[in-house]
Amino acid sequence: MEKTCITSGGAFQIIPARKGTAKFCSVKCKLKDHRVEKKCKFCGKNFEVIKGKNERKYCSRKCSAEDFKKRIAKVCEICGTSFEVQQYAISAKYCSIKCRNQGISKKMKGVFAGKKSPSFKGGKIKKKCAYCGKSFEVFPYRNHTANHCSIPCSKLDTSKETIEKIAKSIKKLQEENPTLHPNYILSQKGHETQIEKLVREELTRRGLSAERQYKLDSYWVDFAFPEHNIAIECDGKYWHSKAEQIRKDKQREEKIQKLDWMLLRFKEAEILNDVKNVGYEIESTLNRQEGDYI
């Protein structure tokens, strides 16, 4: 029987069994239909890519490398000096380590002011040790965190109630002062795990700018694209393979989804074995989101 090619418009012959599947007269027409034209992000040259695949933004590796070398001008928030950074470091605020330390100190100023200050002269208050029962005195700012009269007592007290109480008080303190959270402090110092480094480098190679250690409600996520409401988590094998942590991760994911955010989780083995596929999945998700907004 005869059919019409949807690409060239020419007629071609097929057997009846292929009536519902045959659309093209040749492989050339099939490939042509699956390709779309794009404009190179760097040089502006038009080039073709396959639809539904990893739609590249550059016509060649040379253009990709040259665009990656481009630097962005920024102004230091402390000294006002102009400095340049690469595109992946667009969130940089300071021109040097000295200015960065001053900036962090400036943000921390007032966190322990007044009654929260260790040098507060309003007098100490009496408390009872949760382990030995001995009475001891503390400054008012430690009322919610100091539960033991000494370090040995705090180490010996392993009751579930005490552990939960300490964890709750620390969480409350970090929620009130996000800059005291370990994730924030470590990210300011440039600390990252091996798998986080691999993902960051892969995103940079693809020209994707993600925010590291992004605070989402009461949670901190490894990477985030706030403009797309997409968060990325890199799960290390040691911590995230435990039953209790798996349960917490599930609750965390449900709460993040209620905030109208999409959470992409990648296990350590996935990242170490094929980080390029991880990058492709992230980029594809971003492209689909962009397509939904158009």
Image (cartoon, rainbow, N blue to C red):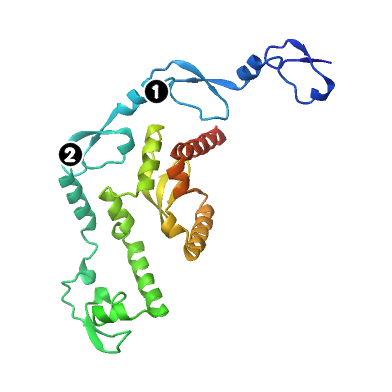
- Residue marked by disc 1: 61
- SS at mark 1 in the image: helix
Cα–Cα span, label 2 and label 1: 36 Å
Determine which quarter of the picture holds residue 210.
Answer: top left
Q: Is residue 20 above or below residue 44?
A: below
Q: Report the label total.
A: 2
Q: Residue at x 48, y 62 (%)?
A: 248
Question: Mark 1 is on which residue type?
Answer: Arg
The local crowd at label 1, few if under 14, some if 14 to 19, many if 20 or more residues have their Cα within 10 Å, is: few
Percent x, y of residue 119: 15, 72
Q: Residues within 10 Å of mark 2 (few under 14, many from 20)?
A: few
Residue 278 in picture, x, y percent from top left: 47, 40
Image point (27%, 41%), residue name: 92
Quadrant placement of the C terminus: top right
Left-right relation of 172 to 248: left
Q: Helix, strand or loop at disc 2?
A: loop
Residue 27 position within the rendered picture, expressed as x and y whole percent measured from the top left: 65, 17
Circle 2 sits on which residue? 80
Observer-nearest of 179 and 36? 36
In the rendered structure, find residue 149 and report the number of the disc placed on it. Answer: none
How far across and how far down the image is residue 54, in percent?
Answer: 51, 30
- Name which residue lies at 71% across and 18% down: 24
- Amino acid marked by disc 2: Gly
Q: Is residue 257 left or right of residue 31?
A: left
Is 37 drawn above or below residue 192 in the view shown? above
Asked if the residue under mark 1 is in contact with the one under mark 2, i.e. CB atoms within 8 Å, the reply is no
Could you tell which of marks 2 and 1 lies nearer the N-terminus?
1
Disc 2 vs disc 1: which is toward the camera?
Answer: 1
Q: Residue at x 35, y 47 (%)?
A: 194
Q: Is residue 16 above or below residue 204?
A: above
